[in-house]
Amino acid sequence: MTTERIPVSTSYSDRFGGRGGPGREVAAYWLSLVLVTFGALIMVVPFAFMVITSFKTQAEIIAIPAIWLPSQLTLDNFVQVWNRTELLRSLINTAYVAVVITAATVFSSSLMGFVFSKYEFRGRDVIFTISLAGMMLPFYVISIPLYLMIITLGWVNSYAALIVPSLYNSFGVFLMRQFMFSIPAELLDSARLDGCSEFRIFWSIALPLAKSAAGALSLLNLMVYWNWFFWPLIVLNSEEKFTISLTLTKFMGLYWTEYGPLTAGSFLAVIPIVVTFLLLQRYFVEGIATTGMKG
């Protein structure tokens, strides 16, 4: 008597009646699309409301219930921002501080990430762990001792008080280190055989290959330091050195806030960073996507 063996399917869709087939993939696609769209709306709607509000009159801004679309567009809020503040000067100050800090941070983070990923030396992992400890501490914890150091150095009301403490970035070191692991060691060894110095290897080979991660880090830093408020509020006290975030506080009082000029100024302030993001978004996506968790 022979027993006929019944083939057993090992596929998920055959076992569970097609629940793992194309139908499930389509459902997962539409579910993810709905979730992403909902998340995008949560992010976009407040920004759109700010832009619309900047063209409203004060009466329409404080109206209850809220008026979404103004009955008549007005540019009075923008005129007030321009006439009552040093808007252009503030934007220049902000751009100077943000660009200098970003450039210095990307360079130092890339160099340290290259060293931590491509060189073996005693205590490397311990030093890297200690450097990451900066990510664990909120800035508010170190602000008081840092401010006392700024007073001792005589840097109060100077750009040095903003730039120098920000030259090291724990997250930047971590991000660049993880990306540097993906660079083949054989490529660096061949450069050494050709007579390249270690810094030349970093500058001419490793850094160009890490441009996507450097672009992502640059964009993140620009957004952070463009919107910086807490530390500039502490160390700056002259209006000609104010960043845009401090300048816009002129429209915020103890009992009354001028929402029209405030939203108009915020709209003007956010335009440069939005344009920068549109220009660097490819590097941002590539840098985040290709930065693995090796090491």
Image (spheres, helix red, strand yellow):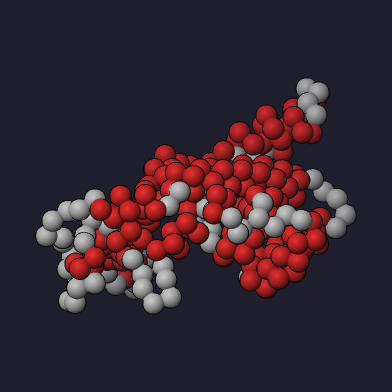
Q: How many marks?
A: 0
- 186 to 131, vertically: above or below: above
Q: Residue at x 17, y 76 (%)?
A: 65
> Can residue 134 be seen at all in this image of the molecule?
yes
- 77 to 187, vertically: above or below: below
Q: In the picture, residue 14 is in which quadrant?
A: bottom left
Residue at the farthest right position = 122
Residue at the farthest top position = 194
Q: Residue at x 75, y 62 (%)?
A: 151
State left or right for residue 200 relative to residue 47.
Answer: right
Which percent across, then down, holds residue 141?
67, 73
- 164 to 5, vertically: above or below: above
Please name whichever residue, 245 or 21, is drawn nearer the observer in this view of the structure: 245
> Can residue 25 be seen at all in this image of the molecule?
no
Q: Residue at x 37, y 49 (%)?
A: 83
Please name whichever residue, 21 or 225, is drawn nearer the observer in this view of the structure: 225
Which percent across, then down, holds residue 237?
60, 59
Q: Residue at x 71, y 71 (%)?
A: 144
Which percent across, then down, holds residue 293?
60, 56
Which percent across, then down, holds residue 45?
27, 63
Please name whichever residue, 255 or 18, is drawn nearer the observer in this view of the structure: 255
Q: Quadrant of the N terminus?
A: bottom left
Residue at the farthest front position = 83
Q: In the picture, residue 230 is in which quadrant?
A: bottom right
Q: Quadrant of the C terminus?
A: bottom right
